[in-house]
Amino acid sequence: MNDALKGRIIWALFDGEGDHPPAALKALCRELVNEQRASWADFNNACDSLRTMKTRDIQCSGFSIRLLYNPVRSVNTLAAVTPEKISERPCFLCAANLPLEQKAIMYRGDFLILANPRPILPFHLTIAHRAHRPQSIYDGMDQFLRITMDIGPDFTTLYNGPRCGASAPDHLHFQAVPSGKMPIEKEFGIKGKFSLLSATDNITISSGRGLGRKIILIEGSRTGDVCTAFRESIDTLKAHTGQSEEPMINVIGHYNNTFYLAIFPRRAHRPAAFYREDDHRILVSPAVVEMGGIIVTPSETDFNRLDASIIEAMYREVSLMPKRKS
């Protein structure tokens, strides 16, 4: 990033030292969003639209879902992410291609923390690597956990794999949203929702029970231990699926003296109904927020007709779990 571009984009610096202790990052992120609302009309309008967004809670078998009707998210829901389409467009996360109004917090010299221009929730952040490199978390988990720890318990960090929700699979990025908004976060602490798979003095690994989709939950207090447990889990998924590349996953991270790292192994990017060309098409493209229990649709028709049975079937279709026998 040249000096002129850096001067236009960088609104604040965070290095975790001196005048920038970790506790300051969450406040800095909130200040950034407020500044962008004041200086960027399109972003402010997108934030205002959240106030009138239609929501509906749906009780499924053993878990709950919040349904959001958000037409602004149609660009993300319908994003074409084939290699051919990616090669035809400029990367919208590279600093040189950001909107002129967009500002960033330079995080530890490696990432740009940005206000998401099409937020799902208030204070929705995108955290993009300053270099253009492929979306992959296997070697970047230590950075993901460091961001999760620095931003603190008021935020939850998110990752979409390049083949299951990332609208920019060619550029490494994470997201962050205020904590406690996704239904799955409330279910982490409910007795009986997870069964223990393994435990050591430093790490426990559990599997979701009756939550409608496959979930692996890693808990630990030390970054290195959590990284190791995550990579071992991914290696196991690779062996299970016969893949040499990163398996299809979404990841949710939270830190409050202990790390909670939820992995959602995936079978498919989108349900078959997404590709239909008739009145039965459903415009839902499950990414990490959807796997966390907030289902976003840009279609009011889908918002009105989606019910527990459709949602449960959708999760079974895209999640890496045994399909129900007919």
Image (cartoon, rainbow, N blue to C red):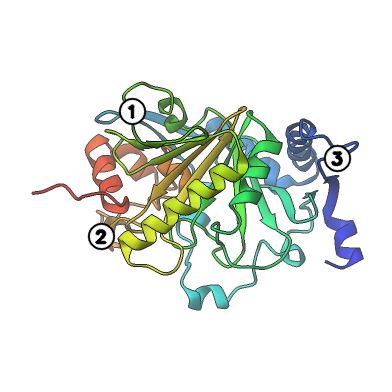
Picture coordinates of residue 315 (x, y %)?
30, 45
Tell me if residue 269 can be seen. no
The residue positioned 63% from the left and 50% from the top of the image is 142
Cα distance, mark 2 to mark 1? 38 Å
| Number of disc labels | 3
Residue beneath label 2, please?
278
Mark 2, Cα crowd under 10 Å, few <14 / some 14-19 / many 20+, is few
Residue beneath label 1, please?
193
Mark 1, Cα crowd under 10 Å, few <14 / some 14-19 / many 20+, is some
The residue positioned 51% from the left and 55% from the top of the image is 76
The residue positioned 55% from the left and 40% from the top of the image is 253
Asked whether disc 3 touches disc 1, contact meaning CB atoms under 8 Å apart, the reply is no
Residue beneath label 3, please?
17
Instruction: Identify the secondary structure beneath mark 3.
Output: loop
Cα distance, mark 2 to mark 3? 56 Å
Q: Left or right of 40: which side holds 202? A: left
Mark 2 or mark 3, whichever is nearer to me: 3
Name the residue type under label 1: Lys
Q: Left or right of 41: which side holds 265? A: left
Q: Is residue 54 above or below residue 129?
A: above
Name the residue type under label 3: Glu
